[in-house]
Amino acid sequence: MALVLVVDDSPTDQHVISGLLEKNGHETLVASDGEEAIKVAMASRPDVILMDVVMQGMDGYKATRELTRNPDTSSIPVVMISSKDQETDRIWGLRQGAAAYLTKPVANQQLVEVIKSVLVK
């Protein structure tokens, strides 16, 4: 299946999301903030990135913008997953280049389906 980079500053969310993805046949990598996400993405070239928004240091919006505008990583779809659930948050995330925007808590099946859908584009 796919190599998925899970970017979240919560170790619990990293563990839960990684466990779900691994049960569905994916391999996972984790990063705890936007800067680390960019480094891991450059080094590992994951198939998809799951990006939290609210993190210390570089937030998910800025990291997504940098990843989607960098020619070396622009082909990697970014799915934002955040507790920020206003329509303006979703629109801003998509404007930064995200392929999809989900709000926490994400239903397991919804997450698996969104990953599938962004991988076929």
Image: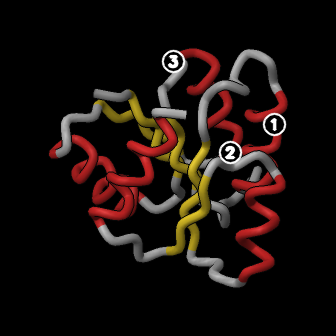
Q: Is residue 12 above or below residue 115?
A: below
Q: Quadrant of the C terminus?
A: top right
- At label 1, the amino acid type is Glu
Q: Residues within 10 Å of mark 1 (few under 14, many from 20)?
A: some
Residue 77, horizontal then vertical, whole percent: 60, 37
- Name the residue tied to disc 2: 34
Q: State which tag comes first along the sequence, 3 or 2.
A: 2
Q: Residues within 10 Å of mark 2 (few under 14, many from 20)?
A: many
- Name the residue tied to disc 3: 44
- Name the residue tied to disc 1: 66
Q: State which tag comes first along the sequence, 1 or 2.
A: 2
For image coordinates 28% across by 59% down, the residue present is 16
For image coordinates 52% across by 55% down, the residue present is 8
Element at label 1: helix
User: Does residue 9 appear left or right of residue 58 in this picture?
Assistant: left
For image coordinates 70% across by 38% down, the residue present is 35
- Point out the residue furthest to the front here: 121
Depth check, front residue: 32 or 85: 85
- Of badges 1 and 2, the one in the foreground is 1
Element at label 2: helix
Task: Tell me if label 1 and label 2 are in contact, CB under 8 Å.
Answer: yes
